[in-house]
Amino acid sequence: QLQLVESGGGLVQVGGSLRLSCVASGRIFDAYAIGWFRQAPGKERELVSCITSTGGSTNYADSVKGRFTISRDNAKTTVYLQMNSLKSEDTGVYYCGAVRGPTHYCSASRRWYEHWGQGTQVTVSS
């Protein structure tokens, strides 16, 4: 069973930056694709970004392209989400999800992911 723990959330002003971390337990972390999702109050959980198990391919929501960067360090069993130029609409609970899957693909669908962390709150104030 893969366990995920998110951290790095907090309160930041518009235009600021945060770096989220998703740390996984488990011996075969490099076999898992990882997705960062966020959920705002009253809204569905939506993809922010995902990265394949090898880190060779990434995917971003249109709303965060050019501002957010996903990366992974398999030796540290950690996936990062660097968030720059934050906007108020980036506010929400950020979750990381994991699935053991193909090396060349990661899905935008939350239903594809099998393991989830507890989430970390990101609040962007104006």
Image (tube, helix red, strand yellow):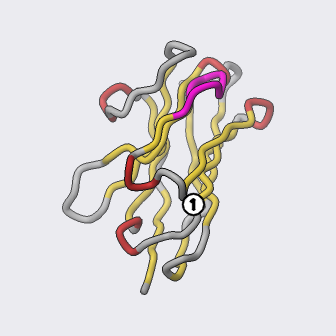
**Residue 35 visible, this angle:** no
Q: Position of residue 67 (x, y in %)?
A: 54, 58
Q: Position of residue 69 (x, y in %)?
A: 60, 49
Front position in the image: 92 or 13: 13
Indicate the amino acid at tag 1.
Met
Front position in the image: 119 or 32: 32
Q: Position of residue 59 (x, y in %)?
A: 48, 36
In this rendering, would 54 be left or right of 113? right
Residue in view at x 64 percent, y 60 percent: 19
Residue in view at x 61 percent, y 66 percent: 18
Tell me if residue 54 is in the magenta stretch: yes
Q: Quadrant of residue 23?
A: top right
Tell me if residue 74 is in the magenta stretch: no
Residue in view at x 57 percent, y 23 percent: 32
Residue in view at x 45 percent, y 32 percent: 115
Front position in the image: 8 or 105: 105
Give the overall secondary structure of the magenta segment: loop
Q: Which residue reaches farthest bottom?
A: 126
Front position in the image: 36 or 60: 60
Q: Quadrant of residue 51?
A: top right
- Classify mark 1: helix, strand or loop: strand
**Residue 43 visible, this angle:** yes
Q: Mark 1 = which residue?
A: 83
Q: Position of residue 89 (x, y in %)?
A: 35, 69
Q: Which residues are magenta?
A: 52-58
Number of residues whose C-alpha sits closer than 10 Å to that of mark 1, classed few (under 14), some (14–19) or many (20 or more): many
80, above or below 85, in the image: above
Q: Which residue reaches farthest right?
A: 75
Q: Which residue reaches farthest left?
A: 42
